[in-house]
Image (cartoon, helix red, strand yellow):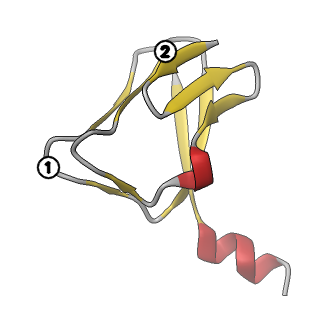
């Protein structure tokens, strides 16, 4: 498992508490090479925050509206 502050990566991928919609200045995350991750958006990366998708990693951002509309 790779830790980076408020989030971590394990075999299931990137785990964000409550799937934060805004990455604030104290939130910095990195998805390591050879890992996949999913975030539910929209998301905002504020000034001073970072989300790095390293070479060989994959990040998919799914609009939460798409998820809600499929199941109602």
How crowded pointer 1 is (Cα within 10 Å; few <14, some 14-19, many 20+) is rated as few
Does 65 sit left or right of 22 as displayed?
right
- Dot 2: what SS? loop
Distance in Å between CA atoms under marks 1 and 2:
22 Å
Please provide percent x and percent y for residue 63: 56, 66
Q: Residue furthest right?
A: 71
Please provide percent x and percent y for residue 60: 56, 44
Residue drawn where x is 14% and y is 49% of the image:
47
- Dot 1: what SS? loop
Which mark is on residue 24? Answer: none
Does 62 sit left or right of 71 as displayed?
left
| Above/below status of 43 relative to 16 | below
Please provide percent x and percent y for residue 38: 61, 43
Q: Residue furthest bottom?
A: 72
How crowded pointer 2 is (Cα within 10 Å; few <14, some 14-19, many 20+) is rated as some
Q: Quadrant of the C terminus?
A: bottom right
**Mark 1 or mark 2: whose residue is earlier in sequence:** 2
| Above/below status of 71 relative to 16 | below
Mark 1 vs 2: CB contact within 8 A: no
| Residue marked by disc 1 | 47
Q: Residue furthest left?
A: 47
Does 27 sit left or right of 38 as displayed?
left
Residue drawn where x is 60% and y is 34% of the image:
37
Residue drawn where x is 40% and y is 18% of the image:
54
| Above/below status of 46 relative to 6 | below
Please provide percent x and percent y for residue 32: 49, 15
Residue drawn where x is 64% and y is 12% of the image:
1
Using the image as rendered, state which of residue 12 and residue 57 is in the foreground: 12
| Residue marked by disc 2 | 32
């Amino acid at each position: 498992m790779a830790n980076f502050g408020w989030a971590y990566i394990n075999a299931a991928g990137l785990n964000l508490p409550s799937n934060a919609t805004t990455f604030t200045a104290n939130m910095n995350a990195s998805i390591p090479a050879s890992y996949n991750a999913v975030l539910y958006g929209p998301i905002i990366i504020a000034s001073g925050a970072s989300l790095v998708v390293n070479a060989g990693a994959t990040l998919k951002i799914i609009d939460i509206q798409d998820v809600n509309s499929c199941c109602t």
